Image (tube, rainbow, N blue to C red):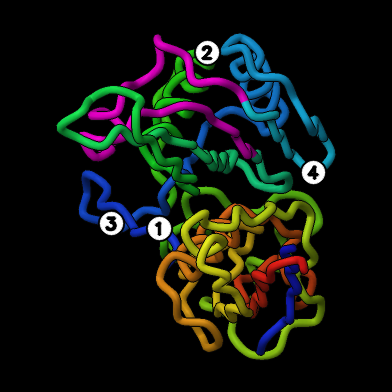
Amino acid sequence: MLAVALCVAGGSARPLAQPGGELALPGEWVSRRPPAEVFTAARETLLALGFRLERDDARTGILMTRRRDYDAGWPAGPALDLAATQTPDAATLYVRVAPGFHPSRLVVGAVVETDTVFVPFKLPIARGRQTMYRQEGFADFIAGRIAARLGEQFEPLSTDSVVRARQSPPTGEAAGACAALPRPAGGVVDVHPRPLQDVALEYPSTERRRLQGGTVRLRAKVTEHGTVTEAEWLDGVEERNLVAAAIGAAGLWRFEPALKQGCPVPTSVVFEMSFSQAR
């Protein structure tokens, strides 16, 4: 049995270097097209790749697919930086086009399940399975297909909130409030972030067999467009595989962002994720 709680407090994936030297958020990009166009292109891309949609919500900009067997025409293990003993077996996608920003902010989160063939056998005699959250290689592949459908090249989204505001500022009623707000905006927020989409934990099989469990507490940041960054262990269980699973799942959550003076702002949260054996 798995339980997840979220407490608002007052790295899941490593930042990547952009061509200009600026650090970028893995799996997050800027598109020059309006959010509605990017959302439509993302939806059409997923369907064209054979995914079935579990969630299709234009209002929040969320697309979530069902688990799909991995296609032979998709990037192979080496292109995904998998170990030589791993082969991709299935994938699930969590895509969001954050409303209220222009140029658009696109987020692609990929979960890839792998089979492991233990060398030197190279046959499915002894196999193991692994769930890889936020698989960056497959997320890049999906983003590239969406960009191709739109006929453009996406710009990586900066890790720095001030730079992000220049890349893709808020629109609508929030625009004026954000322009007047000091950067970076710190202190207590007026409205705390609210989860829009959670992601189920996968209990690592080794720890399940060993009856290892407990609660992992993570500290993370929620960006002004509702993605989770900089997740790190805070306290609780220190088992490496359980912490990695908790961090991976937390990184795929999506939020309505915190608000300060009507402006979406980054803030901190604490996740509590419990792994327990049902007796």
Residue 53 location (% of width, % of height): 75, 25
Indicate which disc residue 77 carries: none
Question: Dot 4 corresponds to which residue?
Answer: 60
Indicate which disc residue 149 carries: 2
Q: Secondary structure at mark 4?
A: loop
* Alpha carbon separation for disc pair 3 and 1: 16 Å
Q: Is residue 160 left or right of residue 77?
A: right
Question: Dot 3 corresponds to which residue?
Answer: 22
* Alpha carbon separation for disc pair 2 and 1: 27 Å
Question: Which residue is at 68% across, 30% downward?
Answer: 65
Q: In the image, which residues are magenta?
A: 68-95
Tell me which amino acid carries mark 2.
Arg
* Alpha carbon separation for disc pair 4 and 1: 24 Å
Q: In terms of sequence position, does the residue under pointer 3 or pointer 2 come before the other? A: 3
Residue 276 location (% of width, % of height): 68, 71
Indicate which disc residue 13 carries: 1
Q: Is residue 261 left or right of residue 35?
A: right
Mark 4 in CB contact with mark 2 (< 8 angstroms): no
